[in-house]
Amino acid sequence: MADDADADGRTRIADPDAADAGDAPPPTARPPRAGADDDRDGTAAGERADDDRIGAAERLLTSLAERGVTHLFSNLGTDHTPLLEATAHLRTEDPDAYPEVVICPHEFAAMSAAHGYAAVTGDPQAVLVHVDVGTQNLGAAMHNAHRAEAPVFVIAGLAPVTAEGFKGSRDNPVHYYQDVFDQPGIVREYCRWTGEYQPPADPAEQVVRGLERATASPQGPVYLAAGREALETPIRPVDLPDSMPRRTRPSGPDPASVDRLVDRLDAADAPLVVTSDLGAPPADRSVEALVDFAEATGAGVVEHGPSTLSFPRRHPLHVGFDPSAAMADADLVLFTATDVPWLPAKGGPPADAPVVQIDPNPTKPTYPHWRFRVDDTVQADPVSTLEAAANRLGGSDDDAVEGSPWRAHAEALAAERRADLGAARERDGLTATEVSAAVDDLVDDSTVIVEGAVTSRGAVLDHLALSRPGSYVARGGSGLGWAGGAGVGIKLARPDSRVICLLGDGSYLFSNPVATAWMAAQYDAPTLSVVYNNRGWNAVRAATAAQHPEGRSVAADVPESRFGTPLDLSAPARAVGAHTARVERAEELADALAAAADAVDGGTPAVVDVAIE
Ligand SMILES: Cc1ncc(C[n+]2csc(CCOP(=O)(O)OP(=O)(O)O)c2C)c(N)n1
Ligand SMILES: [Mg+2]
């Protein structure tokens, strides 16, 4: 920070233009404009006039908007006063010159909303949080954005650094409590870049730098901290070309790599692709590339732990979601756009099947442990590589599809799904299978499924016949509760889409349902949440059973994983007038979902709490 020590030893923010910073009035958020009656007009020869200066807070906001950030998902505190004052000025002068402030009553929901927005658009939005405490509350949402490679620009205030004498100096005991040694360090491991705004620099430079890093491969969150006095400082804007920030993309494959890949494909009878998030934006192009590739080569496709839809789920070459099961029959395994291509404990590729990885960051620098067999690496953009290989092989080919051994696999999976659903309908209680099949009836050409169903996930993947690029997103990490806030962000990004969030009951509680419901109501972003309510943490019970099948905990039904006291899950949503329903019997399900979908289409958020076994 541009500090200046006074004769009396006090540290002040230097005012670059004042002859004596100690005597200068405290800087204001908006210094006088040209022509204003300003006692600093008597500029010494050689100095620049004051009237080209602008408050750092205003410059931060306008530079975000100029670089495409339309939403500032905000949870506020005393650190944000310069930003609020600047916002008020901009609101009256030029409402399009700053991002819309979307108030989020919890930071986890704010970060999840920005992540959701990026997951369907590819474009970063901003999140504004309160000093260290708000940063801590980002918590698991930061992990999710990091692992999902979602670009998000996080801004946090800092405790004031002066005790008195400046606009923004400390005036509350919390300004002492909030002062920590390394605030960005709280989230640094989850970020592609962290910084602190230091006047008299132009904050637009850090906006550009942060956006450039957030959107470079691997994409992810960035974090800028800015203190109150710093944001009150008048600064001189620098000229930044429109070409900044750059939106870089990993380059395509070199010709030799394509040659090798094509040779391997020519030699294979049963090539198999494993992917998790190839269908990230621009989703149309990504999914088309994989479809063309599969149809040119007859390759089967497994989506493993997907966070996007990468391949139409009823395509005759879609062979499900379990790589270990499919790989047993593969003679070439090609994995791309995935961090976890298979679980070794469940079975890896056959020893005689070569394994090829296509990835711009194949050694996975953000993973401490990462060991999978790879025989050939193509370090390149996955989509361009698939396109190049498919082109070399002559593109989509009916014979390749007809002759593919994976068709039989896909048909066997379809038969299993039908049997599964038939058996579920025979049972008295509702199951995740029936709920997912019923949700499938609500899917239209615009629907986005936001998935956080945990142990019901398999049923969601199997029984929703999704095919449209961009129609499915999941958190990509392991921080539960993402789907609630993400749904609001996605609805803001896709106002004409029906956004359906599928959550376990535990996940719904993790999602900060009061905050999320309020955001949906306040910002006209209604979503339909369907809660797969098995009255507890089934994943925890299942993990205990897997590890200690004969153990005492399982014998007692892992009581710690059960929500004993009945919980009216929809109560928080009713607080904002949402449409809510509780479903306990199969006969009620379709009507309840249809009524909720009508409510959402009419602008009212809805929650359907479904009791499942
Ligand atoms: C923030 C966070 N806390 C805890 C966990 C650990 N965890 C993983 S699954 C799970 C249970 C989720 O319950 P629910 O959403 O009801 O789904 P179910 O397991 O019942 O299908 C928990 C607590 C987590 N992944 N994330
Ligand atoms: Mg549960």
Image (tube, grey):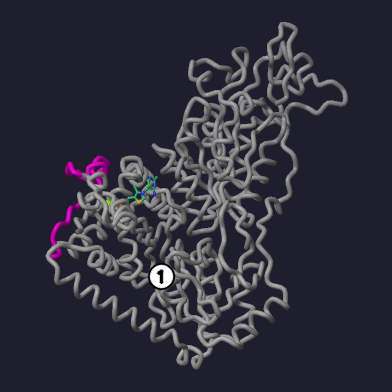
Q: Residue furthest right?
A: 45
Element type at marker 1? loop
How dense is the environment of label 1, judged by Cα within 10 Å: few (below 14), some, or many (20 and up)? many
**Do we see residue 529 in this rendering?**
no
Percent across and percent down for residue 266 are 60, 88
**Do we see residue 379 in this rendering?**
yes
- Left/right placement of residue 171 relative to residue 512 reads right
Percent across and percent down for residue 482 are 40, 50
- The residue at 68%/51% (across/down) is 245
- The residue at 55%/70% (across/down) is 335
Rendered-image quadrant of the C terminus: bottom left
Q: Nearer the viewer, residue 301 or 16?
A: 301
Percent across and percent down for residue 540 are 32, 51
Residue 47 higher or lower than 493, as above or below? above
Residue 79 higher or lower than 491, as above or below? above
Percent across and percent down for residue 95 are 53, 41
Q: Nearer the viewer, residue 210 or 428?
A: 428
Q: Which residues, given as a range, are shown in magenta?
A: 564-587
Q: Amino acid at mark 1?
A: Phe
Q: Which residue is mark 1?
A: 321
- The residue at 49%/16% (across/down) is 172
Residue 174 inside the magenta-drawn segment: no
Residue 51 higher or lower than 492, as above or below? above
Residue 574 inside the magenta-drawn segment: yes
* Corner quadrant of residue 420: bottom left
- Please count the marks in the image: 1
Residue 99 higher or lower than 292, as above or below? above
- The residue at 22%/67% (across/down) is 434
* Corner quadrant of residue 158: top right
- Left/right placement of residue 611 relative to residue 510 reads left
